[in-house]
Image (cartoon, grey):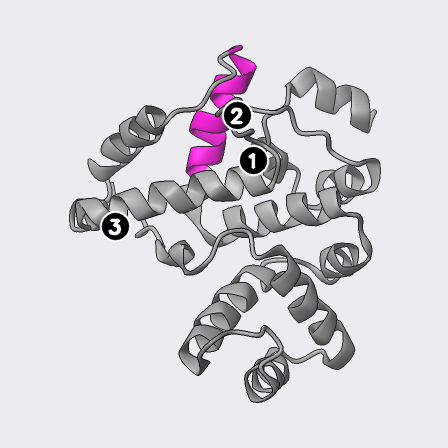
Amino acid sequence: MAHDKYRLSFTSGSLLQMESIKVAALNLECGDWNTVREKILSENLLQARTLNSSKRICREVISRLKTLSLKELNLLVEGNSLEQKYLLWIAICRRYKFIADFAVEVLRERYITLKTDLSYEDFDAFFYAKSEWHDELDKISPATKRKLRQILFKILQETTLLDTNMLINAAMLPPRLLREIHNTKRLDLNFFPVFESDLKELTS
């Protein structure tokens, strides 16, 4: 059975919340990602130390934001901090199936089975299991694997889905964000540690 290759370029940055909001706002103004990219690089709007860093971060942010709808981009710019964090988590999961699979199969599964902690060992077990079907995972170095794990856990902490003691926090999905996801891509709710019964109650 063929499996699409995992993209693993998310090590370019963690959640990148402030950068993403700035880039999203620019896109809502001009409606063209190429124009946004040119403006960011020419004016160093992301305040990167080097042009290469600016290019790398800009490319990463735009690739994530392109997965969001126009309504979602507006909510990202206008929403509160928690809404922004959750929307960016959704964008990351849509962009990177590796992270989406981890979110559904490990993060959410542990939460709904009342295992409220998340460890590096959980990541390693997931990585090993997936490597049987994804040759690209077998080819990366141990250092790169550690980097992937480090960045993923950092993203989870920045979204507040994981605390500093490696305990999983239940997703507190704001009503308007929940409505938007439920009406468009309901399966994306599985990216969050939340009970199905709670979702039914919130969306009923």
Q: Quadrant of the N terminus?
A: top left
- Mark 1, Cα crowd under 10 Å, few <14 / some 14-19 / many 20+, is many
**Residue 85: percent from left, percent from top:** 66, 46
What residue lies at 74% left-to-right and 47% top-to-bottom? Answer: 81
Q: Which residue is mark 1?
A: 191
Query: Is residue 136 visible to the viewer in this orientation of the structure?
Result: yes
**Residue 19: percent from left, percent from top:** 61, 64
- Mark 3, Cα crowd under 10 Å, few <14 / some 14-19 / many 20+, is some
> Which is the main secondary structure of the residues drawn in magenta?
helix
Classify residue 1 as left or right of residue 175.
left
CA gap between label 2 and label 3 equals: 25 Å
Residue 17, picture quadrant: bottom right
Between disc 3 and disc 1, whose residue precedes? 3
Q: Are circles 2 and 1 on residues that touch, CB within 8 Å? A: yes
Q: Which residue is mark 2?
A: 108
**Residue 170: percent from left, percent from top:** 64, 24
Q: Which residue is mark 3?
A: 144
Between disc 2 and disc 1, whose residue precedes? 2
Q: Amino acid at mark 3?
A: Thr
Q: Amino acid at mark 2?
A: Arg
